[in-house]
Amino acid sequence: MKRYLLLCCLFFAVSAQASDRPNIVFILADDMGYGDVQALNPESQIPTPNLDRLAAEGMTFTDAHSPSAVCTPTRYATLTGRYCWRSKLKRGVLNGYGTPLIETDRPTVASHLKQHGYHTAVIGKWHLGLGFQKDASGQWDWTQPLSYSPVDAGFTQSLVIPASLDFPPYVYIDGHQITGKPDRVQPARPFPAYLRKGELGSDFSIVDCLDQLTAKASQHIRSRADQDEPFFLYFPLTAPHKPVLPHGRFAGKTKLGPYGDFVTQVDWTVGQVMAAIDEAGLAKNTLVIYTSDNGSFMRRQSDAGQVDHVSDESIQAYYEGNHKANGPWRGTKADIWEGGHRVPFFARWTGTIKAGSQCDQPICHADLFATAAELAGTKLPPADQAAPDSFSIAPLLHDKPDQFRRAPVVNHSVNGTFAIRDGKWKLVFSDGSGGREKPSGKPFGTPWQLYDLDSDPTESKDLAETNRELVEKLGAELFRFLADEKSR
């Protein structure tokens, strides 16, 4: 009898522990700027009621950073907890035919959670390389299963497109299988509906892609409602990245051209996911995180006389009096300046995260791994084995900022330029933007730039010349991280 009672106690203890582990839904927008969300930019004319609701019902992080100012490296760091510049990809991004970037023996947040009893799924844009096969003549063989897909990176279920929606091949991959063999060619198109020429799958509609992925994600959430195991859903969106092709029902919803309309579709997408969570009765046990992989590609113009996206949709820029896609921050996607990587970041966990709260601590997407591990009640592997640059933000979610410890955040640009952020100070290891804004500069080109982001958030006053000791100190920190292969 005593043995039976002991087994019952153990059973209920394990059940209670499992029920305390939250589901985790991580929504990663593609190229959405800080200023695109009204909750962060009250002057924005783009309605974002669902993102505003997410902010009102959860925590807003005002100093959140993507690990890179472009797509692929951010996704690598988000899933592995390891800065991408430690991998073989030192600059730029993969294309749709790229080979797998995540090392075969590299743990991911998905593989870690799966190992500890989570159901794991990815639905959306992958952009980390896949194992497409070729025939004897060296041509792509679309009839063959892929040799590598997200299933090999720890995901129990996977429905993805290869890369950004402007990169061919335009196909869906379910597990290791292409769902619709390419039977036609998508012609190249200019901005805003920017597309590269390439193979188009028989079941693929570019304008319907985001809707289809949203329906699959919502369906997946509802299917997990009556399951015992907690789940992790990684939902990387295809928008508002190019092609700027909002579905027809969103056309004209704003007065800011196709880009503004596309942002409203992203907001609607988030609303669909939140509705699925709420209707399934999962809100109190589900952590929802929404963020973006980098800043917006929409440039800012200061001259009201210049033609912008409002008057000519083929222009990839807004007059700042019409819209500031990256909010107050300097620069754009690809840059090492704040506009390249300071992004929206909201977290909702009903009943746990204080509604309407705000956190001003610098954090990074690489922190997902450590955060998920702590919330799942698991032990994070040593830094030389996994997640070497990941720090748990769980204390911040629980409103215990005094318990949060993080090494300085390291930022990276499209051309391989580094920056390090320690408190209010940011040191840029370049003589330019590191990206698209002029001057672009070169990695480690001098003079380096030092900014006090508390007093100068727009990075307009370089203080490097008068603070040489601080420059040397921050430089030494970065080089230590480079040499140690870890920052935690």
Image (tube, rainbow, N blue to C red):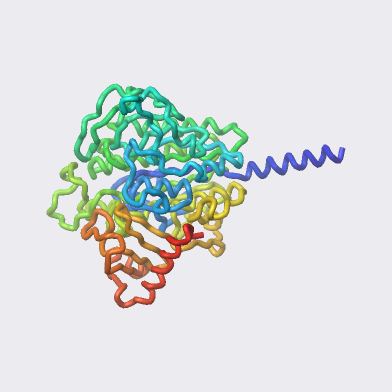
Q: Nearer the viewer, residue 470 or 58?
A: 470
Q: Is residue 155 visible?
A: yes
Q: Residue at x 31, y 25 (%)?
A: 137
> At which x and y percent is residue 488?
51, 59
Tell whether 48 sits left or right of 324.
right
Is residue 304 left or right of 357 when viewed as pictured?
Answer: left
Say above or below: 300 vs 282: below
Up the image or down, 178 lies above or below 471; here it is above
Locate residue 155, reporting x and y percent.
50, 37
Which residue, as the protein is rendered here, is positioned at the far right? 1
Above or below residue 67? Residue 223 is above
State left or right for residue 403 relative to residue 411.
right
User: Which residue is the extreme one toward the front?
Assistant: 136
Between 162 and 316, the one nearer to me in the picture: 162
Q: Residue at x 40, y 24 (%)?
A: 144
Q: Residue at x 43, y 60 (%)?
A: 482
User: Quick one: 81 or 345, which is closer to the camera?
Assistant: 81
The image shows residue 453 at horizontal and vertical percentages of: 36, 66
Q: How many marks?
A: 0
Q: From the viewer's side, name the closer residue of 129 and 395.
A: 129
Q: Is residue 88 above or below residue 148?
A: below
Relative placement, left or right, of 78 versus 71 is: right
Q: Quadrant of the N terminus?
A: top right
> Can the viewer see residue 276 in this picture?
no
